[in-house]
Image (cartoon, rainbow, N blue to C red):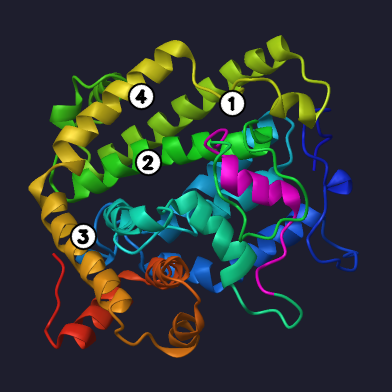
Amino acid sequence: MAELSVYASDPALTQGRLYGTSQSPTRSEFQRDRDRIIHSTAFRRLQYKTQVFLHHEGQHYRTRLTHTLEVSQMARSMARALALNEDLAEAVALAHDLGHTPFGHAGERILNDKMAPYGGFDHNLQALRVVTRLENRYAEHDGLNLTWETLEGILKHNGPVPETTDLSDIALPGYMPLGSHAGLEAQAAAIADDIAYNAHDIDDALRADLITLAELADVPLVGPLVREVEARWPQIEPNRKAHEVQRRLITAAIEDVIATSTAAIAHAAPRNVWDVRNAGETLIVFSEAFGEAVRELKSFLFSRVYRSEVVMGPVRQSEALVGELFDAYMAGANMPGRWGEAYRQADSKISRARIVADFIAGMTDPYAIDQHAALFDAKTRIG
């Protein structure tokens, strides 16, 4: 790995893990975090969790897993260019969606509504619960026993969190300041998530025939790329044209982030990673012009893709399914295995609700459908 900048996260200076471990002769601490995340049960489940289009509607649409891998690749690319720690950026990117429910944001919305009387539900906090409590593969402890820096990135990659955030039932290896920013590696993972959403949702929407390349010709950011590709290769198949537009969009976004962030970091002049955390602003950013174009692109995707009936029909069905699962379990329907035992031993309704939320959030789309069908003795279908 190339020499790191003074403001990068150094694995030799990590704030440590909750449980002590022997040193690895072949891997840094952040590489070990990455490997633990990849080998986790929650990571494998991402293969069967919705991104935008339900996973069973077609084998070529993104799932949470393929989206996560794409985010990870982009985060590493930007971290390398900015002399940051690639392994930490990758670890945060790989873990950033571990707390997502089945059926994408639809599942999260309804679970947050149902959990409102019991502390609410947030997928970033849930990811932290997954890696510190719910993964139970190790003989000596629950969770993955990740470093403080990776946990910080999972919690705060989108920016500071409210000081009122309740972390009382999450065991951390040290004090976690909630109002500060995460390190630059986590910031790189966050903006990589944004880039992946924009580029790949366009690709999936084209595959689903929700939009056409011709309709993108007047959309900011994408329009010039469409015209460039059409002019250069007017006769190639639509899927090739779409890919050429997508790859140019990703390249343009990453290059804009690298150039803008290099200038922002130079202006802030951090002397170490703590200066980054206390800078009072995000330093891995789009330029103002590019950011405005991204917002206009998101507005187009929101109206033409995310709110289309092709997407919203299954969204309404999945919201109803998750809500009915929650209500049934809270009313005493049996949960399998350790979940049912934990529910019976819980000492309050708040504790029981959190156990139900943990159980549902960990479900894949097909498992949620199967559980709903079993509880309601009906053939449950989404989409």
Foreground residue among 125 and 330: 330
Q: Amino acid at mark 3?
A: Glu
How far apart are the two marked residues, 2 and 3, measured between alpha carbons?
22 Å
Which residue range is magenta in the image?
Answer: 142-161
Graded by Cα atoms within 10 Å as few (under 14), some (14 to 19) or many (20 or more), the crowding at tag 1 reads many
Which label sits in the foreground, 3 or 4? 3
Q: Which mark is residue 294?
A: 4
Q: Residue furthest front?
A: 348
Relative height, residue 372 to residue 62 (above, below): below
Q: Quadrant of residue 28?
A: bottom right
> Mark 3 or mark 1: which comes first in sequence?
1
How far apart are the two marked residues, 1 and 4, measured between alpha carbons?
15 Å
Q: Position of residue 287 (x, y in %)?
A: 49, 15
Q: Secondary structure at mark 2?
A: helix
How far apart are the two marked residues, 1 and 2, measured between alpha carbons?
17 Å
Q: Amino acid at mark 1?
A: Ile
> Mark 3 or mark 4: which comes first in sequence?
4
Q: Which residue is mark 1?
A: 284
> Mark 1 or mark 4: which comes first in sequence?
1
Q: Which mark is residue 197?
A: 2
145 within the magenta span: yes
